[in-house]
Image (cartoon, grey):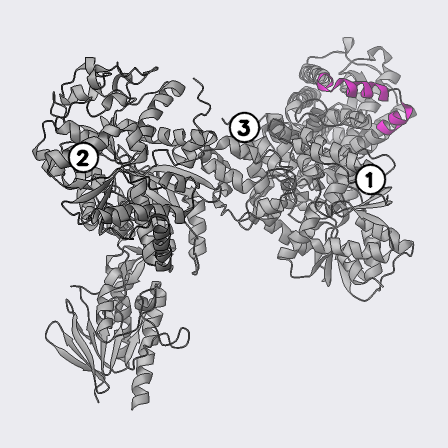
Amino acid sequence: MNKNVMVIGGGPCGLEASAQLHKMGYNVILIEKEKQLGGHLAKWDRLFPEGIEAKEVLQPLVDNINGVKYFLDTEVVSINLLDKEYNVILSNGITVLSKAVLMTSGFDLFPAEKKEEYGYGIYDRVITNADLEKFFATGKDPRVVENPKRIGFVHCVGSRDEKAGNRYCSKVCCATAVKQACEMKALFPDAEIFCFYMDLRMFGRGYEDMYLKAQKDYGIRFIRGRVSEVSETLEKQVLVKAEDTLSGKPLKVTLDLLVLMAGMQNAKSGIRIGEMISMKRSDDGFFTTKGSILSLQECDKAGIFYAGACTGPKTLPDTLNEARAAAVSIHNYFNKEN
Amino acid sequence: MDFGYSLSPSSRIDLDLFDRNRFNTLAEIEPDVLKCMACGSCTATCTAGKYAKNSLRSAILYLQNGQDKQALEYLKPCMLCGKCFMVCPRGINTRHLILSILKIYNNAK
Amino acid sequence: MRERIAGGYDNFVIPFMIGIIFLLVYLFIGLIRILKHVPGEDRKRLFLSFVNPKIIIKDLRDIICDCLLHVKIFKRNILLGYMHASIAFGWFMLIVIGHIEVALFVPQRNGSLYYPVFYRFFVAEQNYTLKGAFFFFLMDFFLLIVLGGVGLAMYKRVRSIAMGMRRTTKPCFADRVALYCLWSIFPLRLLAEGFTAGISGGSFLTKPVNMLFANFFGNDLNIYPTWWAYSIALGLFFLAMPFSRYMHIPTEVLLIVMRNAGLKVTRPRKGFAEAEIYSCSSCGICLDACPMNVQKKNINYSSVYFIRFLRRHNTRKINEIADKCLMCGKCVVLCPVGVESCNIKMAQRGTVTEKLPYDYSYLQEIHAPVKEKKEKVLYFAGCMTHLTPSIIKSMQKIFEAAGEDYYFADSDGGLCCGRPLMMAGKKEAAKELIKKNSELFMASGCETIVLSCPICLRVFKEEYRLPGIKLLHHTQYIDSLIKEGRISVNKDDTSFVYHDPCELGRGCKIYDEPRNVVAALGELRHASKEKKESICCGGSVGSLTLNFDDRAKITRESIKALTVENPDKIITACPLCLKTFSDQSMVPVNDIAEAVAEKIA
Amino acid sequence: MIYEGKQKIWSEYQKEIPEDHYFYVRSCIRQSFFPASEKVFLDITRNRLHKDFFETEHHTTCGGIAYHSDAIPQETSMTIIARQFALMHKYGYENYVCSCITSFGLYTETLETWREFPELEEKIKENLWESCKLEFAKPKYLAHASDLIYKYRNLIASQAKFKLIEKKSGRPLRVVEHIGCHYAKMFPSRGVGGAEYPYVLAGMIEAWGGEVIDYPERRHCCGFGFRQYLIKSNRGYSLSNTHKKFESMEPFKPDMIITNCPGCPYFLDRWQYVISEMEGKTYGENGHGIPVFTYEEVAGLVMGYDPWDLGLQVHQVGVEPLLDKMGIPYDPEKKYKGINNKDLGRPELPTCACL
């Protein structure tokens, strides 16, 4: 029997899992739909809580997959079960017969334009967290004016929002917003910065310190209230309305830049593959794992495994841990069968 | 002309009215003011709060919302007993903060 | 004895005369200024004290003990005490005896300022008399004593720890000028009198010096330069004195008189406070006393520097130090002059805080509860005690065990006592609370108030007028319960150390009752610093600006001092201390009430 | 403002509006305050555009005002509505168009409610039969009258005599579009362009040469709010609402306001006068107010109707400066003359009017 393992998705999760599986002696085939490896991480500038550069994390992950076969710009055309093995036909014409398939298809950012009231794509001064990361990396974005005086961050855009179809918390946006707010303050020391939040979920190690630092050292103003609507003023600034729930009053403020913290959704590309062999998805759109505590890496279909954000929003460290856990699960699966 | 009704003043917070310079002056003397995470412990334990509207949490919020006068109203009943200092999870030196706010915003409109 | 110089004058006295006249004028103007700024009522009180024999006797006793003999410093460190006493008392005696000599031998020069000082220059010895020799002996004796003191003073500059002082103040420029003058005055006097001793006579000290010099230098031409130098040193010293720490020498007399007359600090810089400020000798004893000294950077916030900045009118620094102080009062009780620096700091805070708005209109809505029963004992826990409910519970248990019929006045929280406001300088605001609270207590019809919070107790004792009501801290109350046999406690072999809360110990002078109670529970061990030297827990509401980290360092230092004898438990008697210690201490910390309630039989 | 972004949203909120054959229902408020608007609507659609719009004197109110003022229960208003639909069916129509936004919202709400709760629909069916002996029917298509003017906007433009352009300079007029709250806020998919950036009036303005103004408080209610206006002690709220809108649009210097709701033109118009009396403040040029129009009035102006035939003399804010701007001729003498030169009287305190 062959020791092929198909890994779908070349983000940090797919990279780490491939490297681990390769080390264990499996024949890993990794596919990535984009023209480069790294997924969202490759498009990110810095990571919370310490502000490590994303490439410092990505580079070792990429270096580690030495010896792993991978195909870029490649998608799954079809996948079906043939006598205990999955027959996967790829868009580059290659067909792989693999006993185990690992889904590391990850997440898509919530399309912020769907929250029409925030005016993303309509107002000149509204951008998303991803746009801002690109701005940090390149220093260029026509929507970021020179020397903005007031900047707002809207937490939970497309998360914790029934109207957007996503009731769940995307977990990473709070920390990302605080990180980005500090970075903006460092870039524009004259700017006043506001974070509009519903709850600040600073659950990870070092996150609370980052929050305190944002308050104390960067003077970031945290407003407990969700932005309800955004308008454009004559000067092309954005007028933001929210309730300051702590004082129970409606509030308005004029900003030079509004950053929407778009949340996570199960990746469309992953869902497409999942539908080919009817992988179950929960109400939140993410894949359903076999168990919610003991068997987080397994699908109820034998031979299908999950790791990373395709089973729910996760931080990068969580994702990498899942990648390793999935490698072990797959290893056990092979051993049990033999 | 009296129509029997009139324009009601806006109850909305207008952050565009926030007096940043004055707040910075305060934050320079009392960097602790930035550390408040609005947990409300100070207000809950407040000795004066039993009898009157007294809340450091609210006062800080009002200052940040550009409503300086209201902020003072939330501090004037304070007896400086110091209980809030004992309970603040962020270790804010509440008593001096209160005195400094009263000092800097004494002539607030 | 006869006059050697006709007319009884020589030019070398000019520097001395300039100095002494300048000093006298300065002192006179200063005195008028202080009297002018003292409130009228206090001024009246001061003048009345001059005709009150009791106060006069106290004044004299204090002046002799404090200004001349420095009894307080003796108590602290014998060598340091001797140094101060020898210079002060010795010099004083030199002046007195000088005048007696003039009065006895050249009575026509009575009343001259310089004559007694330079007596030996102006006179020539004709024949030896027992009387003359006696005075010569006395003069040389006291000169020797002073010289010994000066020697010690020089040694102290090099090694202060030998006199029990870990730290000394940094002298300012005027201090240095005056200091070096002071050091040189008496050796120069010895030189001058030594050179002249052949003519004017002398005793065991000056005569040998004279012979020594005569052998080495021969002629008498050296007489003039040394007398000039002596006069210049004196003149310079007097000129520098008003601007130096030595101003404390004359001012302390005024301070003693004013304090004994019952005057209090009302303004931070003027009137009585000015007398206090200029009485500070900059000795630096408060540097070691200050609990903030655990951190080197905070030594600059000691009282001595506060007073120095007050003298220099450096408002920014004055406010900074005034706000930082914990008001633990240790520097006040240890101060050899008794400068009430805490009161000055409160008055200083008042210059900033008294103007701040407040609104206590809600006090009007508070009325004494209508109750049928009039309990004799009223229990007032205080704000802070509500944050340590175990103290309240323990007190309730103790009350019940003693079968006391008591009324828990602030069971649902009460008004603040006003002490924190007083400490913040907001006297007027505090008065409103004091008035309301007094009203409520008087209406309760109680005979005794038992308090759990020493902060409350202090202001109750100092500012409240509650005729017919006895004020007891719960340590005192429990002590009396045990003594009267109303409760009994099981003693075991647990060892305790007792922490004197600032406001209870130094504030209310209650040291023994808590110790009696603790001794009844188990073995009472000692702390390295206790009673009036006890170190503040760091939690004090006295400080306005001290931050959390700095406070924590003080707490640790205080705990270190308490645990030198490895007690099983630290006992305190203040909710604030309890809460502050509990956060930091490895040794369990209890309030005295908790410890008693636990062991009640 | 990124125009392409809006276009993207508009493309997602387009509805198929039938070309012709409508059962037309009037609005209570508009019949009283802007009767000419409804008349012009029928005139344009029937006589200029040659469409089939049927109306009957037997229709009544939809009950909306009473419903929103908590005077009648939902079931009552639904029965009234069922009767209206039944009338449509009786006269052989399937497309229902109403002149009132409140009605449009209520009809939509009712149809949605019936869809969610079929048992309620059954009940109303019975009510209708019991009370009116009419056969229950639901319209195949429900439109608001502004949807139709939107639909015909290019037809109208092709017959236009005037454009929303300042004649002297050729500058497009700056037009504030105000959409009635109940048009799309409750059911965004039922309005042209959705709820956030409605296109129904913007489309007309663009087609007729004007420039749409997007100001921060564009989403805000005109201030009517039923209970807010109808109860005098709450009326200050109503006024304050309108005031807030005007304060927000003022820096954009709008030339005119177009609305598609019965209450909105009334309140945006009359409150300008009240504000000027109370605060001494006006928001238009040269101490005038900003003229407020219904979409039918604007369509009428564009197509060359006589301003006084459009009922513009009953506006509080004088329209003459705008007519001058657009180059529309009018006879000042005839302003307050009714049919057969009957004098209509003059407004007592014409603060905002120019004559």
Query: For mark 1, does the 10 Å Cα neighbourhood hold few (<14), some (14 to 19), or many (20 or more) residues?
Result: many
In the image, residue C300 sits, relative to residue A42, either above or below, namely above
The residue furthest top is C7
In the image, residue C271 sits, relative to residue A81, either above or below, namely above
Q: Amino acid at mark 1?
A: Ser
Q: Which stretch appears magenta? A: C34-59
In the shown orientation, is residue B50 left or right of residue D341?
Answer: right
The residue furthest front is D133
Pointer 2 and pointer 3 on the same chain: no
CB atoms at circles 3 and 1 under 8 Å apart? no
Total count of labels: 3
The residue to which callout 2 is attached is D42
**For the residues marked 2 and 3, what is the alpha-carbon distance in whole angstroms?**
66 Å
The residue to which callout 3 is attached is B106
Q: Which mark is residue A181?
A: none
Q: Which mark is residue C444?
A: 1
Quarter of image, res C496: bottom right
Q: Chain of mark 1?
A: C
Task: Determine the residue positioned at 57% across, 42% down.
Answer: B94
Q: Quarter of the image containing the N terminus of chain C? A: top right
